[in-house]
Structures are given as structure tokens and as C-alpha cells.
Image (cartoon, grey):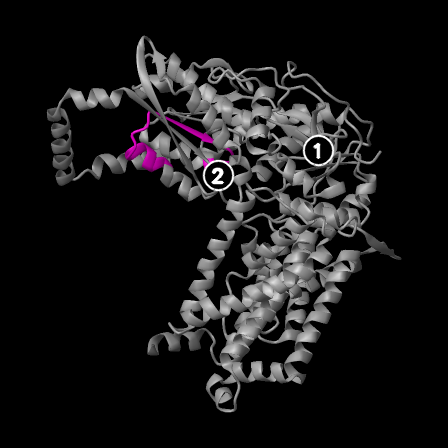
């Protein structure tokens, strides 16, 4: 059992990684990016292309792909999300939904249906492990992912609290108009935030590709786990995302202990419980929701 | 049951207005005369439904090439009983979505007025198409899914006469998997303990219910941790059980992402050191699934519903197994896959049935020809006269193994035949190598 718990915690690191960009974008820009999973798969394909055609290790490939993802994020905000945000709160969500479909099908056109993975290009890292006493196995890649999650989330937290740019991004997310009054360029802050979010998505894509396999339509399931981890951790809180990832993974592990089919259900159950507790705590319980429905 | 309800609603549900409208339409068609009708009659329309995009796109990847070959062979028309027909193959993509498959089938039946429906690959494509054809009275032929899931999965009862008049299916079933696995697993000395991972889906549940008991009777100990959900990302508890039980054979029917996650974790946690045979179905049908696993993919055992070593020729296009595989590799730059032969055999059998029917434009005659079809296709024998149940012709599934290709080969992997229990005419090419050995 202790082995399973350790595997669960390490898996939580992976979930936190894939949830990080989603949570960041929501907290800063108030946008739920439904193209999150597809963009991660896009990054995975870019790394795969570099590795299979030009023999660039995926870790080195990140030096090329992450700036590229940042540029995509910037462009996405400037040309797509910013414009659609003018049409109301719902429109950006629909835009990202459409974007996901476009990305999936472009990837299919370009790369076909074949299953791909980055694991063949990182030697035996994808399945190497340390054996601890008590037949506990700690996967090396899982440890790398967990460490990356901590560094990434911690770095983002430090950046947001201690740098001028970070503060201006936070100010924009709190109140763009007032931030503008004190000289913060809201457009710039949002575009930079989108670029940062896409860098984290690029990292998530890299680890998705190393850990498992991907194909052009692999984005949606990733989005689901990312979304659950982000919500459990409290959308918008970075450390909460790590906690959310770990809670999700442990709930799944526990679910699998109860019944082999309980793996996904365990995660979904915790997600729903957290959601309801949150809604009740904020006075928006089931009744609150009904009240809202009546008045609107 | 569903048939009863459906037919009742159509008879009682026909309103006076509908009746008049239909009679007028019918009358107009008759009045417009035989000429238009005769022209339409000169063209045979065949629907071909497969998953070309979406998660099942691996199955449909080679269909473009196979259809090209078929269209070339049929370019001059089809000569049936001294009458020349133009042939139009209307191929459609289900986008891996079962409800879309059903809609496509209805569109082909109602708006295109097809004479024969062909459906290929996985229950998600075939079952909705076959159901639409059965309801509309259009002959339908399909292949590539376990026939039990096609026959019993659509409401047929064991022991009762077949409820299907219009739909026919050929290819492997659980019985063939059983023969193949016994033959394959006895090639290597093991403790006969089999760890199985069957997912909670149509294939997985059919295999758990039907195959596992047969294997147990042959002296294999089945260690089954229970069904898992597709999309699971951590398999520690199953791995712990397999290690504790000391299984030496592993068998699974997973989709590629699930298997990659499982097998890497099995390697991390030291399970694969004890595995002598890793027999995987579904994942590993196509070379890219195995390439994605890197070193861990080598020596994984598989089973093929077609292999380029099959000694048969396609009656429709005249190509042999190696010609089909080499032609695809030359045209696409990609490695051949077993789906090539399966899709080709479906076209083969479909057109053999049209040729054998007394009138290819008469749907009842085509369905009758299907029920009596006994021919040889790209995958070998297709014979509806002697199946285990009516409407079904079982086909082979040949034991195979993925091995590293020889130096200088065009592709990194080679797919070799290791046993031939379900079709002894297929030559065995190599000896099964232990996964760890």
C-alpha cells in the first residue's frame, strides 16, 4: 500500500504540471482555456519532430519549443482571446473550444493517426526507477516531473509576488481599469501572462510525451485531469494546484484499491465533493444556484 | 424486442397524410417512366464506412490506398451476367464516432440508395452501421471486430435462430483467439500463470467472459485483478498483484496510451523481469504503437487478422499479400499494416457477393448471395455456409511477434509470424522469442 501511495503522490506532480497553465490562465486572465490539452499535445509533437527528424533530445528541444510556445501564447492573447473577450465572458471559452478542434485536426492532417511518444528519445529514463526497501519503486521520470512541478509552481509564485512585472499582472487580473490608471499596460500584462501560461503548457506536453503516448486527439483527456486538479486545488492558487494534483492522484489510487474500476471514479468523486463544498461555502449551494437562475 | 417495437410503430404510425404523400411520390416516379430508372440501374453503388480520423484513425489510415486499388480495378465497370454496371464506391469517415457512423449509414441508405454496405473496423463503426442496414433492409457486410460482439452484442441469443436477415460479418472471434493463444503460449516453457488486464469496454468484457474460462480449462492460471477503466494513469495495484502471483505470461486488450502507461510502470516496478510472453491485442496492431514504446516494445507478441505472408490473392484487384504491402509502402512511405489486407478482403468479399447474386440491383438477391457466399479473399476463406451461427464466417488470427528489423531495413521493426493454428496455410516465419531472454 505504501508503494501505491508514493506512486499516487508522484502522479500528483504530473497532474499539477498539466494543471499549472490552466490554473494560471484562469487566475490571471479569467479565461478557461479549453484548448489547453490540445496545445500541450502540439508542444509534444514539436518535440517529437525535433527528436525524430533532427535527433534533438526532448530536453534540449525544450530550449526551442518553449520560446515557440511563449510566442504562440502571446499571439493567441493578442489576436484571438483579447478580441473574443470583448464579446462577453462566454465567447473566449467558445473560442478556445474551437481552437482545440482546429489544432487537433491540423495535427491529424500533418502527422496522421499514428501513436507517438517521446520516451524512445530519452533512453531508459521513462522506465528507470530506484528500488527502496519494502519493495517501493520510485520512477526516475516521475521524480523529475515532481521536482519540475515544484520548481515551476514555486517560481511562478515568486515571480507574481516579488517582481514588478508579476505585480502588474496581478493588478491587471484584480482590476484592469484601476491598474491602467496607475500606469499598468493591461494588454501587455495579459499577453505576457498568456505567454507564460503557454510555456507551462509546453512543459506539460513534454512530460505527457515522455510519460505516456499521444496522438492528435490526445488533448481532451489531458484537459479533464488538468481541470479537475485545478478545481480541487482552488482555481487560481498555484500551490493549491500542486495540492489539487496530489489529492486527485491519491483519490484515484484509493479508488483503485477499493475496486480496479474505481481509479477514475475516485478522482471524479473528490472533484465533485470539493466543488460542492466550495459552492456551499460561497453561499452558492444548490439552492444558491437556483436563486441565481431565477433572478437572471 | 426492439425489432417488434420498430415495425409496429412504422405500420401504425403511418398517417393518412404520409400515406397520400408517399403514394403521390411513388406515382410520380412511375409516371416519369422507366428511362430514369434504367439509367440509375446501370450504376452499382457500394457504401464503405470506416474510421479515417479520430482516435480509431489507425484503422482507417490505409483505406485510401486500398480504395484506390479497388477503384482502378473497377474503372472499366463490372460485368455481371452479361450486363455491364458502372461501380461507384462511396467511402465515408465515421470520425471514430458511433452515432456519426449510424447517421452516415442512414444517409447512404436513404439519400444515396446504395446497393450494398461495407463497414470495417471496431464495434464503434460496424454495429451502428449494421443496425441501420438491418432496419432498412439493405445488405451489409463487415469485418475486423470479434464476431461475438457483433452477433450477441446486437441482440442475438445463443441457441436461438439468427435474428439478422440483411447483415453479415466475417473474421476472428474469441474461439480463434483461444486457439492462437494456446498455440503461441505453448511455444515457450512457462509456469502457465497469466496476468490479464482487460478493460471495461465491449472487447474487454467479451474477452473476460468468453476467453478467460477457456484458457483456464487448458491448464493456464488466470490472474485477473478486474476490469480497469480506459484512461487510467496508474497501475500500481495491478502490478503488485502480478508480482505477488509470479505471472510469467501477460495478456491485455488495451488502447495504446493505456498500455504505454502500464508497461512503463511495469518496467519501473520490476514486473517485466519475470514476464516471458507479453501478448497484447488492440495495441500493437500497427507498428507505430510499438515504436512509441521504444526498447520496451521489442519482442511483444501480437496476433494478426492479416499478414503480408498470407498466401492469398485479392480476387478483386489481383494483388498478392506482398504486392499489397510493398505497394502501400511505396505509395505512402509508411510501413505496411495488417489493416491493408482486412479492408481489401472486405471489398473482395462484397464484390464476390454482388457477382454471385442473381440480380445485383435486387437487395434481397444480394443478401441471399451473402448468406451463401463461399469464396477466397485476401485474408483467405470467407464461408457463410458453415459458420458457428448464421450470418457469421469466422476468420483467422495468426500469432505474431514484433522484433527488431535486420540491419539496413527501411523500418525499425519487423512483424513475424510465429504460429498458424487458425490457418495452417500461412507460413510460420520465426520462432517465438521470450520477452526476457
Report which residue position mark 1 lands on: B413
Q: Secondary structure at mark 1?
A: strand
Using residue B216 as the reference point, say whether residue B350 is left or right of it.
left
Few, some or many C-alpha atoms within 10 Å of disc 1 (few <14, some 14-19, many ≥20)? some
Q: What residue sits 33% from the left and 9% below the top?
A: B81
Q: What residue sits 75% from the left and 41% below the top?
A: B296
Which residues are the magenta region? B105-125
Residue A270 shows in the view: no
In the rendered view, tell whether residue B3 sits above or below residue B271.
above
Q: What residue sits 57% from the left and 37% below the top?
A: B203
x and y percentages locating residue A267 in the rendered image = 61, 61
Q: Is-magenta flag for residue B118?
A: yes
In the rendered view, tell whether residue A199 sits above or below residue B238.
below
x and y percentages locating residue B322 in the rendered image = 61, 20
Q: Is-magenta flag for residue B182?
A: no
Q: Secondary structure at mark 2?
A: loop
Report which residue position mark 2 lands on: B52
x and y percentages locating residue B52 in the rendered image = 48, 39
Alpha carbon distance from label 1 to label 2? 24 Å
Amino acid at each position: 500500500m505504501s508503494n501505491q501511495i508514493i506512486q499516487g503522490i508522484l502522479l500528483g506532480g504530473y497532474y499539477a504540471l498539466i494543471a499549472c497553465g490552466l490554473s494560471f490562465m484562469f487566475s490571471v486572465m479569467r479565461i478557461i482555456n479549453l484548448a489547453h490539452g490540445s496545445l500541450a499535445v502540439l508542444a509534444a509533437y514539436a518535440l517529437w519532430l525535433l527528436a525524430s527528424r533532427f535527433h534533438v533530445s526532448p530536453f534540449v528541444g525544450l530550449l526551442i519549443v518553449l520560446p515557440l510556445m511563449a510566442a504562440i501564447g502571446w499571439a493567441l492573447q493578442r489576436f484571438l482571446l483579447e478580441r473574443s473577450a470583448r464579446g462577453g465572458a462566454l465567447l473566449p471559452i467558445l473560442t478556445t473550444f474551437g481552437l482545440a478542434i482546429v489544432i487537433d485536426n491540423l495535427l491529424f492532417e500533418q502527422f496522421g493517426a499514428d501513436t507517438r511518444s517521446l520516451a524512445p528519445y530519452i533512453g531508459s529514463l521513462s522506465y528507470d526507477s530506484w528500488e527502496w526497501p519494502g519493495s517501493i519503486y520510485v520512477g526516475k521520470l516521475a521524480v523529475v516531473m515532481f521536482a519540475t512541478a515544484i520548481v515551476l509552481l514555486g517560481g511562478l509564485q515568486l515571480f507574481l509576488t516579488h517582481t514588478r512585472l508579476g505585480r502588474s499582472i496581478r493588478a491587471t487580473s484584480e482590476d484592469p481599469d484601476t491598474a491602467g490608471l496607475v500606469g499598468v499596460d493591461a494588454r501587455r500584462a495579459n499577453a505576457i501572462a498568456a505567454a507564460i501560461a503557454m510555456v507551462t503548457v509546453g512543459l506539460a506536453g513534454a512530460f505527457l510525451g515522455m510519460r505516456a503516448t499521444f496522438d492528435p486527439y490526445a488533448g481532451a483527456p489531458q484537459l479533464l485531469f488538468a481541470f479537475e486538479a485545478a478545481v480541487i486545488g482552488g482555481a487560481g492558487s498555484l500551490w493549491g494546484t500542486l495540492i489539487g494534483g496530489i489529492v486527485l492522484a491519491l483519490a484515484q489510487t484509493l479508488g483503485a484499491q477499493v475496486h480496479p474500476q474505481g481509479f477514475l471514479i475516485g478522482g471524479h468523486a473528490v472533484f465533485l465533493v470539493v466543488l460542492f463544498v466550495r459552492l456551499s461555502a460561497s453561499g452558492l449551494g444548490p439552492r444558491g444556484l437556483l436563486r441565481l437562475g431565477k433572478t437572471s | 424486442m426492439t425489432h417488434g417495437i420498430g415495425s409496429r410503430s412504422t405500420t401504425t404510425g403511418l398517417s393518412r397524410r404520409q400515406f397520400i404523400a408517399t403514394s403521390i411520390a411513388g406515382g410520380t416516379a412511375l409516371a416519369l417512366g422507366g428511362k430514369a430508372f434504367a439509367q440509375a440501374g446501370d450504376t452499382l453503388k457500394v457504401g464503405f464506412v470506416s474510421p479515417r480520423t479520430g482516435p480509431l484513425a489507425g484503422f482507417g489510415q490505409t483505406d485510401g490506398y486500398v480504395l484506390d486499388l479497388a477503384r482502378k480495378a473497377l474503372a472499366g465497370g463490372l460485368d455481371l451476367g452479361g450486363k455491364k454496371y458502372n461501380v461507384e464506391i462511396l467511402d465515408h469517415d465515421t470520425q471514430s464516432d458511433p452515432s456519426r457512423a449510424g447517421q452516415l449509414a442512414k444517409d447512404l441508405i436513404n439519400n444515396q440508395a446504395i446497393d450494398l454496405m461495407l463497414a470495417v473496423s471496431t464495434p464503434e463503426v460496424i454495429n451502428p452501421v449494421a443496425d441501420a442496414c438491418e432496419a432498412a433492409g439493405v445488405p451489409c457486410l463487415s469485418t475486423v471486430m470479434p464476431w461475438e460482439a457483433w452477433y450477441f452484442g446486437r441482440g442475438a441469443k445463443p441457441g436461438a435462430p439468427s435474428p439478422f436477415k440483411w447483415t453479415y460479418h466475417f473474421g476472428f472471434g474469441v474461439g480463434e483467439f483461444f486457439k492462437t493463444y494456446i498455440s503461441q503460449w505453448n511455444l515457450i516453457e512457462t509456469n502457465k500463470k497469466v496476468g490479464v488486464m482487460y478493460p471495461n469496454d465491449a472487447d474487454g468484457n467479451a474477452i473476460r467472459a468468453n476467453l478467460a474460462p477457456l484458457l483456464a480449462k487448458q491448464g493456464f492460471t488466470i490472474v485477473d485483478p478486474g476490469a480497469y477503466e480506459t484512461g487510467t494513469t496508474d497501475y500500481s495495484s495491478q502490478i503488485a498483484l502480478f508480482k505477488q502471483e509470479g505471472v510469467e505470461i501477460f495478456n491485455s486488450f488495451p488502447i495504446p496510451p493505456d498500455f504505454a502507461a502500464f508497461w512503463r510502470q511495469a518496467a519501473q516496478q520490476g514486473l517485466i523481469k519475470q514476464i516471458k510472453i507479453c501478448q497484447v491485442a488492440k495495441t500493437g496492431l500497427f507498428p507505430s504503437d510499438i515504436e512509441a514504446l521504444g526498447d520496451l516494445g521489442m519482442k511483444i507478441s501480437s496476433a494478426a487478422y492479416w499478414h503480408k505472408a498470407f498466401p492469398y490473392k485479392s480476387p478483386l484487384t489481383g494483388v498478392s499479400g506482398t504486392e499489397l504491402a510493398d505497394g502501400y509502402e511505396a505509395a505512402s512511405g509508411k510501413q505496411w499494416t495488417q489493416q491493408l489486407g482486412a479492408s481489401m478482403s472486405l471489398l473482395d468479399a462484397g464484390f464476390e457477393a454482388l457477382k454471385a447474386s442473381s440480380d445485383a440491383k435486387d437487395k434481397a438477391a444480394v443478401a441471399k448471395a451473402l448468406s451463401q457466399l463461399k469464396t477466397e479473399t485476401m485474408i483467405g476463406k470467407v464461408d457463410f455456409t458453415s459458420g458457428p451461427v448464421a450470418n457469421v464466417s469466422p476468420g483467422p488470427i495468426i500469432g505474431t511477434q514484433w522484433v527488431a528489423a535486420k540491419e539496413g531495413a527501411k523500418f525499425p521493426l519487423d512483424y513475424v509470424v510465429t504460429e498458424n493454428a487458425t490457418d495452417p496455410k500461412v507460413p510460420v516465419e520465426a520462432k517465438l522469442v521470450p520477452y526476457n531472454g
